[in-house]
Amino acid sequence: MAVNSFRPSKYVDHEIVDAKNRIVGAIRVKPSGVLWSPKGSHDWLGVSLDKFQEFMKENGRKQKK
C-alpha cells in the first residue's frame, strides 16, 4: 500500500514592498540559487548560491534573530 506524502516546493516567492506597501519586485528562493524580478517584469535575474554567499559575506550586516 502506498503512503501519501507532501511534495517539497520547487521554490518560494516573496514580494518586496516599499514604505507605502506598493510592490516593487519579487525574490524567488530556489535550491540552486536566488532570483530577483522587478515589478511588472516576466524576466528573472539570478545568482548561484555560491555567488550569493560571497556577496553576503562581503556586503551583509550582522542581524539579530
Image: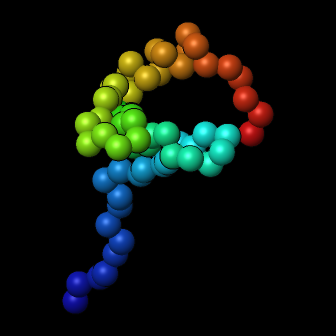
Q: Residue at x 41, y 51 (%)?
A: 12
The quadrant where residue 6 appears: bottom left
Name the colour scheme. Answer: rainbow
Q: Is 16 drawn above or below residue 12 in the view shown?
A: above
Q: Nearer the viewer, residue 65 or 20?
A: 20
Q: x%, y% of residue 55?
A: 48, 16
Q: Residue at x 42, y 50 (%)?
A: 13
Q: x%, y% of residue 10?
A: 31, 53
Left or right: 19 as drawn, with respect to 46:
right
Q: x%, y% of residue 18?
A: 61, 39
Q: Residue at x 34, y 25 (%)?
A: 47
Q: Quadrant of the C terminus?
A: top right
Q: What residue occupies the far right of the structure in this picture?
A: 64
Q: Nearer the viewer, residue 39 or 1?
A: 39
Q: What residue occupies the far left of the structure in this picture?
A: 1
Q: Quadrant of the N terminus?
A: bottom left
Q: Residue at x 49, y 39 (%)?
A: 24
The quadrant where residue 2 appears: bottom left
Q: x%, y% of residue 21?
A: 62, 48
Q: Nearer the viewer, residue 11 or 22?
A: 22
The quadrant where residue 39 appears: top left
Q: What residue occupies the far top of the structure in this picture?
A: 58
Left or right: 22 as drawn, with respect to 65:
left
Q: Is 61 drawn above or below residue 1 in the view shown?
A: above
